[in-house]
Amino acid sequence: MKTNPGRFFEDYRIGEVIRHAVPRTVSGGERALYHALYPARGALYSSDEFARACGLPQSPVDDLIAFHVVFGKTVPDISLNAVANLGYAEGRWLAPVWPGDSLRSESTVIGLKENSNGKSGNVYVRTRGINQRGEVVLEYVRWVMVRKNRADAPSPDAVVPDLQKVVPAADLVIPEGVDFSGYDFTLAGEPHRWGDYAVGEKIDHVDGVTIEEAEHMLATRLWQNTAKVHFDATFREDGKRLIYGGHVISMARALSFNGLANAQMIVALNGGAHANPCFSGDTVKAWSEVLDKAETAAPGVGAIRLRLVAVKQGAAPFALKGEDGKYAPEVLLDLDYWALMPI
Amino acid sequence: MKTNPGRFFEDYRIGEVIRHAVPRTVSGGERALYHALYPARGALYSSDEFARACGLPQSPVDDLIAFHVVFGKTVPDISLNAVANLGYAEGRWLAPVWPGDSLRSESTVIGLKENSNGKSGNVYVRTRGINQRGEVVLEYVRWVMVRKNRADAPSPDAVVPDLQKVVPAADLVIPEGVDFSGYDFTLAGEPHRWGDYAVGEKIDHVDGVTIEEAEHMLATRLWQNTAKVHFDATFREDGKRLIYGGHVISMARALSFNGLANAQMIVALNGGAHANPCFSGDTVKAWSEVLDKAETAAPGVGAIRLRLVAVKQGAAPFALKGEDGKYAPEVLLDLDYWALMPI
Amino acid sequence: MKTNPGRFFEDYRIGEVIRHAVPRTVSGGERALYHALYPARGALYSSDEFARACGLPQSPVDDLIAFHVVFGKTVPDISLNAVANLGYAEGRWLAPVWPGDSLRSESTVIGLKENSNGKSGNVYVRTRGINQRGEVVLEYVRWVMVRKNRADAPSPDAVVPDLQKVVPAADLVIPEGVDFSGYDFTLAGEPHRWGDYAVGEKIDHVDGVTIEEAEHMLATRLWQNTAKVHFDATFREDGKRLIYGGHVISMARALSFNGLANAQMIVALNGGAHANPCFSGDTVKAWSEVLDKAETAAPGVGAIRLRLVAVKQGAAPFALKGEDGKYAPEVLLDLDYWALMPI
């Protein structure tokens, strides 16, 4: 058999390192497409001049481009036979990705736990994105529920990694040179600085985008994520194409510009849940909540921890969970991340 | 309130200079997307070699890329609460935009006139697109009708700028170095030179393009124009997403290649009206009329003033206005511009 | 008449050389779009690092980008009045195309044969794609059935070129420097090498992509192929937009990664038929058959001759032709090509 059937639960071993295929060089082309696919307006990722004024040599590609490229490579090895994408933790952006950089991905299996039904199990991997100089630009833990292929495959000893609920502010990596002391709030689009945000504050980002099949497929292919369910209308019984969760992440993050224009760089992913599936025709909106704030050693740079929630049409204001603790059906995404903001 | 509510009529002051947010670096990515979004075939904007043979160091990005990027930045400050986009005047392209250039926009309020109903008023701005060297690459006047927020806000003294009906040929700026004396008409796609066009001549550009939601949204986002009405199907009562007028401009201009392949560079925008709204599913066609011709000082370079009309399905040949002087319902755009053409 | 009516059968002369219009510079933008439009994952075309490890100075643009760009230019001169695209032969890629290269196209008329009904005839052209250094990067023969404009135009003497059924392995051109002796199969995505494939072997590539109007139009415009039938929903009586056959070629080739990840470079096009039309909403899948294998003089490099078949929903496994020798109605494409693969 020449085609890749994907790995099943019994194919993973604790400690195993999986080198994922198809390295990728990114360029101004990927950046332009990102701006076409999402209403992304972060000035630092839009203008080389603005980035230079913030202490960087040029504008890096969006942090989520780095995430999607690194993530996309893991799909054939990690989630081709996944039943569910269960969570993220301990995500950190460790170095900017510049146009011209080539990225590859590597994952280490750090946890395995078979489900009691014996038909599937949870696989925990720590994934690293590595550039052409061998530098780790991004790392994160992800866990997915993966089907077993053979019901009689022996159960591995359960190993569940002890993961941080939140990346400690002290562990955030500020890219070399970043200096917001001369930050131009007018050019950035909003006057609100780190000091203007209060923990507990919620922001309705107002704008909405109705999703088209062509757009989510363009995006998902761009990251070389080729899971059938996103592309093949004959695959699911209902004829719908499930939208890649990362498309919703980028859409929500871009929408959050309106109210968080100065939350410039994503430096950590504390956790995240794809609460409900998203389909073409859905209109995505977003709201955020300030979860925490921290100072950093970089000049003029504060860190802000944000909950980013994507919802679809029909959602109540600031919709999240019901009294039963379950996500409201209109909630698509609940993401917890750290960003850098001028003080 | 952290989100941007936009400005209302009473928020503008004569003489005020508004620095618009989110500067943007353009690259080969934007150019490639432009070629994917529009049937653009102007050789000078397609090939570095062809541009060099015309005296330029390389191929600039399409003049309308420059226009859209500069225009998009003004939306949050000028037209977020606009009821209507009323007109353009005195538009001039002053320098080419090269891949790698970073653009920002600035507008000066040059006119204010409250409507007699006291609910809105016209705002006139002169917008300048400025590159990373501080050079103005494009300037134009635009006026829009903007809602008042408070009915009791005092009316400003009416100031209506005296605008040129047409940019005089003597004021056209030919980019440095442009020389059409060795122009290759075969590579450009058509044999017709400046001398072959007669004032009053009309050209039906024949081809048509049916518009898709995904395409106009990709384009509009690419220019960081994030007006809700273009993206959110839940925003208008009829569930339709209004297509950004600039998308129709670029579509019509690209279609006009067939008959005007040698109208290479746009150097002035004399005026323009978005006559009727355009929606997904409409099939856009275009026709042009030669309004004027002028010589220039550059070798081999003539100027041609063109009316560019975009129409949709059902339009009569060369449809424009009815006997009542109003645009026919199938007319989408009526644009008046100067282009450079080999003599 | 200023617009291009296209050539009719009686307008071609044996030996005539047609220089096609609109040269094109390609960049990282075209590459990024190619990755967004197709599930392309060939490592050599994705990563500069991987390409260097294969002996190239950087990653070239996909061989099919070169093909589409060169082909697109020929449309206004060759197939604007074509009734049918009949075949390809003797296609060879002669040099890689790098980001920054500028391509133009030239066709020589090598065959003419009027049909017995006197209403149309077959035109055979040998097309060459030429870069800014005057190097031929690609050549192929294509023949199309073209309408006559005047029924009384005299019939030319019939000339039917003697075309090779298959490009001989000895005529394949291996790009300078290509060396697969240190090939990284893990990064490439599959362990199967040239020696693992047997002549006669068939591979079902499993994945499918449902086609959207926006996507095929973006792709077709990107190659500056502006044939009305692909874009204008009012053109055909059934209101359908016919999908450019090259879109199906690229889709099928990209899908063939799953099972042929190491068939890295296309070096020859032996023949091809667009068996049935493809429309938006079709779900495209692909299968391949190994037709032949050959050694090459380049280190570690083998050649593999493949049949690539694209089918749509409802196709039987490995669907091709019925007992009547005609293509099954679900078959979209039957392509015969040579690729390079690590031994």
Image: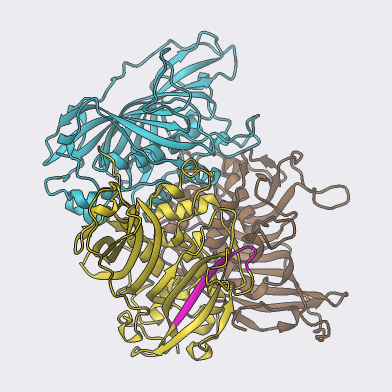
Chain colours: A brown, B cyan, C yellow
Q: Considering depth in this image, is A125 or C280 the residue closer to the camera?
A: C280
Assess whether residue B107 is covered by the magenta stretch: no
Quadrant in the picture for the C terminus of chain B? top left
Q: Is residue C251 above or below residue B223?
A: below
- Snapshot quadrant of residue A158: bottom right
Which residues make up the magenta segment? C305-315
Q: Considering depth in this image, is A128 or A50 the residue closer to the camera?
A: A128
Quadrant in the picture for the N terminus of chain B? top right
Side of A132 relative to C17 (left or right): right
Q: Considering depth in this image, is A127 or B168 the residue closer to the camera?
A: B168
Q: Considering depth in this image, is C287 or C330 the residue closer to the camera?
A: C330
Q: Residue furthest front?
A: C116
Q: Residue at x 28, y 61 (%)?
A: C103
Q: Residue furthest top?
A: B116
Side of C90 relative to C1 (left or right): right
Residue A232 is situated, as x and y percent measured from the top left of the image, at: 64, 61
Residue A235 is situated, as x and y percent measured from the top left of the image, at: 69, 63
Residue A190 is situated, as x and y percent measured from the top left of the image, at: 53, 39
What secondary structure characterizes most of the magenta part? strand
Side of A32 relative to A237 (left or right): left
